[in-house]
Image: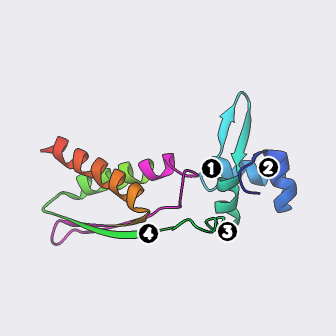
Amino acid sequence: MHGNTYTVEEVARQLKLHVKTVLRHIKEGRLRASKIGKSYRISGPDLNDFAGLAAPVANQGEIAARTTSIVEVPGISAEFASRIATNLQALLNSRRGHGQPMHLDTAYNPLESHLKIILVASPREAASVLEALDSFLGAAQ
């Protein structure tokens, strides 16, 4: 399934689901798809994510380095923490299917007004996400 683009009908056939079930998953945001005209197209990596299949293993000779970054943002409101989490998740969703998979978790402690962000990605992808976070925090001051 890697690297191709599929129609809703093809996805339904591959997953042994009804076409309407696939469309419902798309509309509910569980299956990522691009709308082209009046129909949807689903990329191979998005289909693999939805189906729970592993990403392709790096070719021999390639080093698939990963980094885990923990960012703590003290003294912010719940609303601002929510905006940060939403913007970071949108950034990660826009990069899906490009390079290695990324993972982001956020946790907000309302008693301490403290946001913790955990990012797992390749060093290059992590750097670009952290740079975007820094820009977002800087623009809010």
- Point out the frontmost of discs 1 and 4: 4
Residue highlighted by disc 4: 66
Does label 2 or label 3 sit earlier along the sequence?
Answer: 2
Instruction: Give the percent coordinates (x, y) of residue 41.
Output: 72, 41
Judging from the image, what secondary structure is the residue with disc 2 in?
A: helix
Residue 93 appears left or right of 97 = left
Chain part drawn in magenta: 91-117
Q: Residues within 10 Å of mark 1 (few under 14, many from 20)?
A: many
Residue 80 shown left or right of residue 59 in the figure? left
Distance from the alpha carbon under mark 2 to that under mark 4: 38 Å
Give the class, few, some or many, for how many residues have Cα within 10 Å of label 2's Cα (few <14, many ≥20). few
Q: Amino acid at mark 1?
A: Arg
**Circle 2 residue:** 20
Name the residue beneath numbered marker 1. 32
Residue where numbered disc 3 is placed: 52
Q: Residue at x 23, y 45 (%)?
A: 135
Disc 1 is placed on an element classified as loop
Number of labels in the image equals: 4
Disc 2 vs disc 3: which is toward the camera? 3
Above or below: residue 34 compared with residue 107 = above
Q: Name the amino acid type tagged 2.
A: Lys
